[in-house]
Amino acid sequence: MAGGISRRLYGPRGWAILALCSIAIFVVMPLLNLAVPAHSPFHVSAYWVTLFGKIMCYAIVAVALDLVWGYAGILSLGHGLFFALGGYAFGMYLMRQIGSDGQYRQPMPDFMVFLDWKEFPWQWWNSDSFLWCAMLVVVVPGLLAYVFGYFAFRSRVKGVYLSIITQALTFAAMLLFFRNATGFGGNNGFTDFRRILDIPIATPQTRMALFAITGATLIGTLLLARWLTTSRFGRVLAAIRDAEQRVMFCGYDTVHYKLFVWTLSAVICGIAGALYVPQVGIINPGEMSPANSIEIAIWVAVGGRGTLVGPILGAGLVNGAKSFFTQAFPEYWLFALGLIFILVTLFLPHGVMGLLKKRA
Amino acid sequence: MRILLIGLSWLVASGALALDAATVNKLGFGDGDEKIAAIAALVAEGDPAAAALLQAAMDGELQVAGKRVLIVKREGAVDAATGAKVSPLPEGREDVIFNNRLRRELGGALAALWLISPDRAVRLAAAKELTGNADEAMLPLIKKALAKETDAGVKQLLELTQASLELKTGAKESRLGAVRTLGQSTNPNTKMLLLAILEKNKEGVFTEPDEDIRIEAQKSLRELEARLAWGERAGVLFTSVSLGSVLLLAALGLAITYGLMGVINMAHGELIMVGAYTTYVVQNLFKRTEFFDWYPLAAVPASFLVAAAVGMALERLVIRWLYGRPLETLLATWGISLMLIQTVRTIFGAANVQVENPAFMSGGIELFTGVVMPWSRIYIIAFAALVLFLMYCLLTKTRLGLFVRGVTQNRAMASCVGVPTARVDTWAFGLGSGIAGLAGCALSQIDNVGPNLGQNYIVDSFMVVVLGGVGQLAGTVYAALGLGFANKLLEAWQGAVLAKIAVLVFIIFFIQKRPQGMFALKGRALDA
């Protein structure tokens, strides 16, 4: 049975590539970063570990968006919101872990001391518990996506209309989180984390552990998504993408199919956000800006929609290019990104994966 | 600060100095109370030399040396009493110090003196300065100024000040009159004065012993509050219509392009920005000529043409190739918007640029104190109405409009009967983009012009289009005005950010109920 599933997911070559990637993430990177001395040319510095960790978080989000866009035909321009919500939920816990080590040496987070708040607002209830916050990471984006999706799919909002209202949703949330009164640090968001599970967060070991967890989550997400999309459920989903009315008239309740995959996608984004925050060390409402969410879509488009592996490649390529450009020619990055948007949509409808397939 | 500057220019124009030496000496050498007495005496003299002296004192230019009081300016020093030039400067000068209490006195005194300036703007500014911080000692001066005053606006302000002063001191009759005058005011500050009359002290006894005055004050207060409430309503109404017209301008072009081709043009906001920057360039061309005030006449067509050209190029180069793939079009146009933003940043810099209003658009009509209708906004409302009218004519009376409507309603059928749909697309896209450019031209008059201008409007204009539905101008108009009102009403109640969030959430729910907007074309398709 297990063999059957593994054959269904990937062929021998696929599994081999996946194994190589796992070795790179779980063995090579830790060795090069922790065991190889800093002066050696083979040493991988903390900068690269954080950068790769960040890109892997983005890759998880890209896979999540590919699930809804590539397989159900729903282009969300608000996935950054779910990502940021997960980040904020986990950020609350990290803020509580700072304890009294903040600038003001008070048990409350600095921004609350600064605003002269005497007690935690209701959103922060139980936020010093790791498990509670880990649960929020899953529940908050999931619940929001469920409620939003329920209404949207039930009234058959689709296409560009759905894209636009998801954009409005993330825009509204961004405005909300910019307010100090919302209770999440306003403009500055959360930063200056010290510890996670009482372990100092800035040590190489913690960084590596977070990196490895992110890598495991990415691989897990990929396999889960692959399993889902190759199942009967996945076939119904693709049918909905291609001809929703026919599927409806065949007797399927398309709303539930879409709703499930939509909520799952949001939850995965939330988890990615929670992994992103401790590695990057900051979360602020800028993550919810509509521009960020559109960028997620372009990762997927660059890699190739409906391929799952493609979006991971796309997230890596676009973010790699971004890191390169913003260091080498900061003023040209927007030109490059804009060109990517235009060229990929015009000339690469199937993304990089399409190119690779054509070659093969 | 403005009042000081205006006043100063008047002072410079006035004649030589000659003042009572004793008073001047008191101002220079006396203690606090003597200085106040000296200020009062100078005000009573009411001549420009006194005003110049007080202004110098205000600006910290008054110094004493030996027994003389000097006004020391950068260009040289004069004797404060005689006005004679003093050079070289004597040794051992000391600044005359005016503490905050004295500075307050000085400010009031200067305002009182400016009341008799021949320049209306100076008098108006001075009268405004005096409302609320006049001093009983100025009452005679204000009366004198009132007797001579011819301008209605200044007169009204002065009468108010006079009434508030008389309320404190005068006989019963004059106080009753004062209370009545206060009731005619439109200034929110007078409310405090009236409320003070009606106050009770700790024992529950009215602080104002005279009942007649209390009754009169009650009546005046009611009148005043009613008038202020109307003023506020008028203010909200005006800002709502103003916001609505801005939204309308921003969304009209989008409604055409979206209605026609079913694609969301994410670069629409940047076309607005292109229009605004075109206005900026045109304004710069006119800057050194004497025709500066006429630059909008050139800027309006220029911004239309430039934005339309950009839009048509976009349609030809990118959007045309993405037919039937609306989601990809959305992404591609987003890419275009990023490139346009960066282009503008590269050419004009990342900072905002300054677009100056022509003279006829600066200033405004003051309905009530605090409720000003700026001319720029009034013109924009008119401009939006004009653009709307022209659009209406174009869509209903011309051949192009007929084609555009035909393609919007049923592309395949229009094509079958011989409408050149591809060409119509290009022209309509150019038209929509040109209107975006017009919106940018209008926005440059009231908003900051910077590379991010478009981003600030894109979400709003989508909301208008989504709310209004596609294919009819009426939907866009109602949606724009409705959103303007909703935004401003909620804003007055809950603040700007929450208002915006509430409106967005409302639209999200509205779309669930009516996915095709308020004014959708009726059809039988399940997939619209």
Image: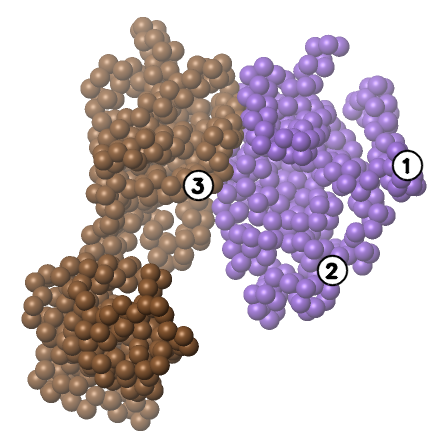
Chain colours: A purple, B brown
Is residue A112 visible in the rendered image? The answer is: yes
Marks 1/2: CA–CA distance? 35 Å
Residue visible at 60% across and 30% down?
Answer: A333
Chain identity of mark 1: A
Which residue in the protein does label 2 denote? Answer: A97
**Image quarter for residue A62?**
top right
Query: Mark 3 falls on what kind of element?
Result: loop
Between B332 and A268, the residue placed more toward the observer is: B332
Residue ID at (11%, 87%): B171
Q: With A147 as the anchor, is B303 left or right in this view?
A: left
Image height of B389 relative to B113, above or below: above
Mark 1 — residue? Answer: A40
Q: Residues within 10 Å of mark 3 (few under 14, many from 20)?
A: some
Pick whichever, B489 or A106, lies toward us.
A106
Which residue in the structure is indicated by mark 3? B352
Q: Secondary structure at mark 2?
A: helix
Q: Is residue A86 left or right of residue B134?
A: right
The residue under the point 63% across, 61% down is A124
For mark 1, give the secondary structure: loop
> Mark 1 and mark 3: span between their CA atoms?
48 Å
Tell me the kind of residue under disc 1. Answer: Ser
